[in-house]
Structure formats: structure tokens, C-alpha cells
């Protein structure tokens, strides 16, 4: 019997080739799109799960609550980890990370700039899974000036030579001995690592942050006991602060507390720490998109399956006459749709393999479809294919199998399938979903356009960035600036500790009128006197730093308007702010100027109170504004002068605009993906309605012929045929417009600065969907209406 059902299934496929291809292709494309998205989603959720103790690792952070809201920072002081480990038995281990920043590393004749270097405790190998290829993890980081490198770094500096015992010179100042080599970390890690230096090095250097609990520049990770609820430890942290630091820092202004972030959540929920956009937002968007695309494809499949089942009513009648019972008919219809849906699933797997390289190119990842690595996705889609087959086949199977043979052979039941409320509802649903995603894709596109064109408060174009790697470069900045300013194509040269758009440190300050228990966090940047004019930042009050005032270098500070507003200073000039310079010692800066608010951080962060100081020993970047007429020639000139002044430092440059716009490129990738899949969603919906329109026209062939004989016009017939399906598309597009403005996810977490709602944008999106559907349906209507009456009346 199964062989018979299989034969009938393939006969029907071949008999109705157009419908079969549309049905198979539509469902296959829908499943393919969803597979691509879900592979990406699974990849995003896989971050940091390669660590053996991933379920037990938590990052310690601090939270500052005030009348203005809450702010979380993913860092803590160095002393906190030691005390937690001593006093709480549920804390089984702890390790700290202190970023070294970008440094020059030299070995023999090899000289490179390197990033992703951290000072860490020896316990890092007990907390995290960093497999050691060479060396002993228990002793590798015990001594000062020891370093463990990745196998990539080992190959880069030492080739095939054993690196153990080799000496790497950091910033022409410190010699580190290689004591171990670890495997390269997977790309699915929130913290990329090239080298790990011993934490004891900081002790040997008498680093002030090791004893200053207000020095929040360390990342602390705790390993808790198995199956322990980390919220129970969070409840104990306020008492911990009060015990060790005298007060819980609760004031009328703000409260400082600690919190724990699970390791598995750090990558996706980083926006909760205030340091990057929330990637969970795009994952949520793509997950919903995958669901909707599968739903649209399934609707097409069910629509055509139920519609075409009507023409098989006579087949059912004959089968009942020759003895077929209801259960066999149900099995036949369900079996046919299951075979069809699994054919679509097989096709979808092939299409996914073919399109995955192009998808990887868009998202700049290296994803792959592996049944062994992602069995849940494979099993999920097998289950989905089975479910689609059952749902699609159940409606016609149970409906038609109930007919009496006499009624069926007279053709009466077929008419009940011509106008199905179920099919109408499905058409409305699929076009409503398609319209919704087109609307939201256009919203994100409009949001990106708004942010790109928003006034950020400074001019980022035509600015070249050079890194300041050590004190030798730092001490010769004036010499370099003098050499470069002699070129007429170089307009200005400045220096700063941080760069706009790349994140900026936030440090503790004590504004005038506040006490040590009322410390405030401020964005902190150190610049020279050319920085503000080079970027075109406007002064709101007071003056800029100046070489004519020698005291500016160590005493003067500048704030932004946000700081003056937050601290209630109507006349901020002359006010003071205390800030830490060495261990527990504070120096006092006098405000000489106020700049207008500008976006020193990228657009994913609100503008915060800003502290600008002028300390030459803290500069890390050189900024060079150039003319655009001869950029290559100007860069060659800069490189020549750099090599003459710093022959032992490699020349490395970048453009400020590229660095600042990196955030926008991430959003652009999201828009590209959303746009591509939204277009596919519309195509799938139109494929379904195209086949449905063709089926309706075929069912009404004789009616069309009779109407033409009786004098009906071609236009009248086209309108009559279009009306039946277009009214449902119109209902869908009009219905969804009010809901299109509602966010699918909380976009405020991803876009702190939202563009104004453009209702006309949503109307245009809905109109676009309606026009595409109208053209699709009209093609079949015109084709049917232009057929000669004699051919229509010969039908059947």
C-alpha cells in the first residue's frame, strides 16, 4: 500500500508541475532562510561555552544608582577578588585581568605592535579552559615578568623553535620571559587573547591599583561552587562593601554596589554593562525573522495543499466506491504531504550548503552546517518538516475523507473549497507578516541614516591616527609635531589618551561639593592643547588649554555641558574636581573651560559627564588632520618623518573616520541581512499567491468563457479575478500599519538615540507590498482573461 501511495504522490507531482515546483521551491527557500538564520543564532549563543566551568564562572561588576538611573560597569578593584575569595566559601576561585593595551614587542630583529595582552593571576588556568601546549600551568605565571603566549604568537615570533625561555622586550622597557604556550582560543570568546603576563609583575612595579579599592580598572572573574545560585552571593555584596570600605557609599546622590554577570551571557548581554551594543537584540530580531519566514513558507504550502485537494474529490469518491475506508484515505493524504515536506527539507539542506558561503561573507563569520556540531538544528528542522506535513495534510485529509461517494461523484463538495475562510485567513497572515518585516527593515535603515547624519559635535573626517607606544615616542611628540606641521598638506597635529568612537575609560572623580563617599564616575580623556581645535569641538564657556599658560599641563581641566548640568553648576569656571593620580593621593584640577556636548563614545552610548585633562605623560594617540588632495603623498611624508625620528618603531596608521564608523558597519550588516530576508519573505508570499491565483483562474475557466460570450469585458474579468485575493492583501497591509510602529524587540537598548517615527515610511512599506502582490495576481488574471472563449468552453 505504501508503494501505491508513493506512486500516486509522484504522479500528482508530475501532473501538476507548476504548482509542485512552486510549492516545493517555496517551502525549501523558507526552510533555507531559517536554517541560515538559526545557524547564526546558534553560533552567537555558543560564545564562551568551550570553557569546562562555563556554568560556574561569573564576572564581577559595579553598579551606580542615582536619581538619573543606573549605570553598570564590567570592572572592579583588585582588592575585591582577594577578599571575596577569603571570606565566602562559595567562591572557589578567582582571577583578575588587567589590560596592558597596545604595546611594541621585539624579539631579535622582529618588531610588532600587539594588542589583547593582559596581566592575569596564576589561577586563570584553574578558572578558564586555556589548554597548555608547552609549559606547566601551575608555575607558568608565578614569577614577575613571565608571559604565556598563544600558539599563533609563538609561530609569529619564534617559528618552529621552542619559545620557552626566550625573552620578549615590551615597549623597549621590560623584558618578559616566555614560560608557556596555550592553544589559540576559539573565535567564540568574548575576550580575545594573544598573551598573558603574570600578575606578580604589577606587584613588582608597585602598581597603585593593587591597594586602591577605588581603582576600578580590573576585570574580576569568580568560580563559584557547583549548582550555586549566584543571586545568593549578590545579596551578600552590600554587606561586604560596608564591612571593608567603611560605608556602603549610599548618599543622596548615588549608591555603589556589585553584581555578577554569568560568563555565558557576557557576549550577548554586554549592553547591560554599558560598554557595547546589546547583541542579543539582533539575535532576537533574527530569531523572530526565521520564525516568520518559516511560517510564511508553511502557509504557502498549506494553502496550495488544501486548495488542490478539492480537485481530488472524485478520486476520493472512486476510492470509497471500490472499498477504501476513511483511515486509509487519511493516511494517503498525510503520507503525500509528508513526502513532499521532506523533499523540501532535503532541498533546503542542499540550498543551505550552497548559500552559506555568501551568507558568511555578509556577516563576516565562518559558519558551517554540521549535523554533529548543531544536531539540535538538524533535529528541529526534521521535526518541523514532519509537523508541516501533518498540518498541511490533515485539513484536506479529514475534510474530503468524510464525503459520501454519491455526493463526491456529483462534484458538489468541490465548490466548498473554492472559497475557504481558512485559506483567506492564511493569506492575510502571511502578507501581514511580510509587511511587518518590510516596515521594520525600513525603520532600521532610517535609524542608521539618522545616526550617520546626526551632529556628533566634532569633525572626524580626514584625520590620521598614529599610536604612541612608549615613553620615547611620548617624549618626542613636540619634535614630531614640528616636523609634520612644516608640510602644507598637514593642517594640524594633536595628541590624546583615547579616540572618539573606540570607547573611553570612566574613572572616579570628586567634584566640588562632593565628599570621598560621593565619588562620581566621569568619562576621562587626556589631551594636548591642539586636540579640541583639530576636531573642531566648540567651546561653550571659558577657554582651551594653551601653551602660554604653563600651569595648564597639570592643573587645568575642561568639562562638557553634561557635567556642568549634572553637578548643578550654572557657573562652572573656577570650580574644582579631585582625581586620583597615585595610590590614595588625589590632585585638584581647576575648570578653565566647558566644551559643548559631543559624542566621544560611539552612538550606542548616551553622552556622559566628561573630564578632560592635560597630562603629556598620559597621551596614547597622535591625530593628524590632512588635506584631501594628496592623501598617499601625505602619508608617505608622515612615514618618512616617523622613521627618521623613531627608527625602532614600526609605522602604523589608520583613519579616525574608519574607527568611528565601525559601529555603523555592524548596523549596516544587520540591515543587509534584514533586507535580504524581508525581500525573500515577500517573494515567498507572492509565490504562494501566484500559485493560488493560477488555481482559482483554472477553477473558473468555464465561468470566464461564459462571461466573455455574454459580453463581459477583459477589464471586468481581470477586476473580478483580482478582487477575490487582493482584498485579503489589502486587509493585511492596512491591518498591520498601526502595529508596525511597535518594536519587535526593545530597540532602545540598541539605539539610545532614536529617529522620529515616520508614519509615511510605514505607509510606503505597506504600499510596496500591496503593489508587488497586485502585479503578481494581475499576471494570472490577465492571462486568464485574454484566453479565447472557445478555448475556455472546451475546458473539461
Image (tube, helix red, strand yellow):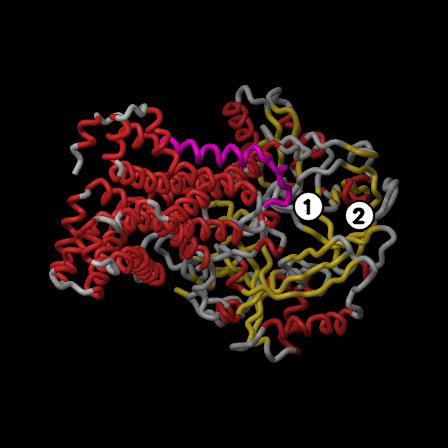
Locate the C terminus and report the quarter of the image it occupies. Answer: top left
Distance of label 1 from label 2 (alpha carbons): 27 Å
Residue that numbered label 2 is attached to: 566
Q: Measuring 55% from the left and 37% from the top, which residue is drawn there?
A: 448
Left/right placement of residue 487 relative to residue 253 reads left
Left/right placement of residue 648 relative to residue 238 reads left
Locate the N terminus and report the quarter of the image it occupies. Answer: bottom left
Q: Earlier in the sequence, mark 1 or mark 2?
A: 2
Q: Measuring 35% from the left and 26% from the top, which residue is drawn there?
A: 716
Residue that numbered label 1 is attached to: 618
Residue 25, percent from left and from top = 27, 44
In the image, is residue 657 above or below residue 738? above
Magenta region includes residue 775: yes
Q: As rendered, which of 526 and 237 lies closer to the eye?
A: 237
**Badge 1, how many Cα within 10 Å: few under 14, some, many 20+?**
some
Q: Which residues are magenta?
A: 751-776
Left/right placement of residue 85 relative to residue 570 reads left
Tag shown at residue 447: none
Circle 1: element type: helix
Amino acid at each position: 500500500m505504501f508503494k501505491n501511495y508513493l506512486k500516486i504522490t509522484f504522479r500528482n507531482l508530475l501532473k501538476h508541475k507548476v504548482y509542485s515546483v512552486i510549492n516545493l521551491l517555496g517551502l525549501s527557500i523558507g526552510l533555507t532562510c531559517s536554517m541560515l538564520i538559526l545557524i547564526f543564532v546558534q553560533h552567537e549563543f555558543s560564545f564562551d561555552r568551550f570553557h569546562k566551568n562555563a556554568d560556574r564562572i561569573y564576572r564581577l561588576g559595579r553598579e551606580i544608582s542615582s536619581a538619573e538611573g543606573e549605570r553598570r560597569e564590567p570592572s572592579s578593584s583588585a582588592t575585591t577578588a582577594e577578599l571575596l575569595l577569603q571570606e565566602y566559601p562559595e567562591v572557589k576561585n578567582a582571577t583578575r585581568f588587567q589590560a596592558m593595551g597596545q604595546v611594541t614587542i621585539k624579539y631579535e630583529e622582529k618588531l610588532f605592535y600587539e594588542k589583547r595582552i593582559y596581566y592575569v593571576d596564576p589561577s586563570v588556568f584553574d578558572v578558564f579552559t586555556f589548554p597548555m601546549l608547552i609549559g606547566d600551568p601551575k608555575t607558568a605565571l608565578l614569577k614577575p615578568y613571565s608571559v604565556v603566549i598563544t600558539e599563533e604568537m609563538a609561530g609569529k615570533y619564534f617559528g618552529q623553535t621552542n619559545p620557552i625561555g626566550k625573552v620578549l622586550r615590551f615597549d623597549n622597557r621590560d623584558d618578559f620571559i616566555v614560560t608557556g604556550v596555550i592553544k589559540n582560543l576559539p573565535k567564540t570568546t568574548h575576550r580575545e587573547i594573544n598573551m598573558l603576563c603574570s600578575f606578580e609583575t604589577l606587584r613588582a612595579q608597585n602598581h597603585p591599583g593593587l591597594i586602591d579599592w577605588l581603582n576600578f580598572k580590573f576585570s574580576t572573574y569568580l568560580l563559584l561552587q557547583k549548582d550555586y545560585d549566584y543571586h545568593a552571593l549578590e545579596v551578600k555584596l552590600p554587606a561586604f562593601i560596608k564591612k571593608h570600605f567603611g560605608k556602603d557609599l549610599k548618599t543622596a546622590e548615588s549608591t555603589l554596589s556589585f553584581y555578577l554577570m554569568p560568563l555565558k551571557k557576557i557576549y550577548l548581554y554586554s549592553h547591560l554593562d554599558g560598554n557595547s551594543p546589546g547583541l542579543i537584540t539582533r539575535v532576537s530580531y533574527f530569531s523572530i525573522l526565521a520564525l516568520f519566514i518559516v511560517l510564511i513558507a508553511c502557509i504557502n504550502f498549506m494553502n496550495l495543499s488544501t486548495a488542490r485537494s478539492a480537485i481530488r474529490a472524485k478520486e476520493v469518491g472512486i476510492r470509497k466506491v471500490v472499498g477504501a475506508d476513511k483511515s486509509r484515505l487519511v493516511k494517503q493524504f498525510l503520507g503525500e504531504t509528508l513526502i513532499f515536506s521532506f523533499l523540501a527539507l532535503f532541498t533546503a539542506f542542499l540550498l543551505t550548503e550552497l548559500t552559506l558561503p555568501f551568507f558568511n561573507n555578509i556577516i563576516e563569520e565562518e559558519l558551517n552546517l554540521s549535523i554533529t556540531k548543531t544536531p539540535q538544528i538538524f533535529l528541529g528542522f526534521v521535526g518541523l518538516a514532519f509537523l508541516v506535513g501533518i498540518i498541511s495534510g490533515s485539513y484536506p485529509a479529514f475534510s474530503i475523507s468524510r464525503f459520501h461517494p454519491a455526493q463526491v461523484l456529483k462534484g458538489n463538495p468541490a465548490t466548498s473549497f473554492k472559497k475557504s475562510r481558512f485559506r483567506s485567513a492564511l493569506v492575510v497572515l502571511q502578507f501581514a507578516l511580510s509587511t511587518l518585516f518590510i516596515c521594520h527593515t525600513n525603520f532600521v535603515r532610517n535609524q542608521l541614516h539618522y545616526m550617520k547624519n546626526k551632529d556628533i559635535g566634532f569633525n572626524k573626517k580626514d584625520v590620521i591616527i598614529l599610536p604612541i607606544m612608549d615613553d620615547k615616542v611620548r617624549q618626542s611628540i613636540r619634535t614630531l609635531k614640528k616636523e609634520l606641521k612644516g608640510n602644507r598638506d598637514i593642517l594640524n597635529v594633536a595628541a590624546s589618551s583615547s579616540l572618539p568612537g573606540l570607547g573611553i575609560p570612566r574613572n572616579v572623580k570628586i567634584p566640588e561639593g562632593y565628599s570621598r563617599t560621593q565619588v562620581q564616575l566621569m568619562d576621562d580623556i587626556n589631551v594636548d592643547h591642539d586636540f579640541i581645535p583639530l576636531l573642531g569641538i566648540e567651546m561653550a564657556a571659558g577657554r582651551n588649554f594653551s601653551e602660554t599658560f604653563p600651569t595648564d599641563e597639570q592643573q587645568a581641566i575642561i568639562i562638557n555641558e553634561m557635567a556642568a548640568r549634572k553637578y548643578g553648576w550654572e557657573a562652572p569656571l573656577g570650580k574644582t574636581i579631585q582625581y586620583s593620580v597615585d595610590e590614595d593621593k588625589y590632585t585638584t584640577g581647576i575648570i578653565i573651560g566647558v566644551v559643548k556636548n559631543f559624542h566621544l563614545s560611539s552612538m550606542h552610548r548616551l553622552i556622559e559627564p566628561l573630564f578632560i585633562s592635560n597630562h603629556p605623560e598620559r597621551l596614547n594617540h597622535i591625530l593628524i588632520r590632512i588635506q584631501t588632495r594628496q592623501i598617499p603623498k601625505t602619508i608617505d611624508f608622515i612615514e618618512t618623518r616617523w622613521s627618521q625620528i623613531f627608527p625602532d618603531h614600526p609605522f602604523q596608521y589608520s583613519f579616525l573616520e574608519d574607527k568611528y564608523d565601525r559601529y555603523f558597519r555592524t548596523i549596516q550588516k544587520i540591515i543587509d541581512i534584514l533586507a535580504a530576508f524581508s525581500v525573500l519573505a515577500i517573494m515567498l508570499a507572492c509565490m504562494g499567491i501566484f500559485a493560488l491565483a493560477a488555481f482559482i483562474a483554472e477553477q473558473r475557466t468555464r465561468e470566464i468563457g461564459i462571461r466573455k460570450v455574454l459580453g463581459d469585458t477583459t477589464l471586468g474579468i481581470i477586476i473580478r479575478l483580482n478582487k477575490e485575493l487582493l482584498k485579503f492583501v489589502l486587509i493585511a497591509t492596512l491591518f498591520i500599519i498601526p502595529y508596525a510602529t511597535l518594536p519587535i524587540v526593545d530597540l532602545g537598548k540598541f539605539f539610545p538615540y532614536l529617529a522620529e517615527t515616520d508614519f509615511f515610511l510605514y505607509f510606503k512599506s505597506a504600499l510596496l507590498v500591496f503593489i508587488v502582490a497586485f502585479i503578481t495576481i494581475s499576471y494570472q488574471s490577465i492571462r486568464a482573461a485574454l484566453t479565447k472563449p472557445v478555448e475556455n468552453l472546451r475546458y473539461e
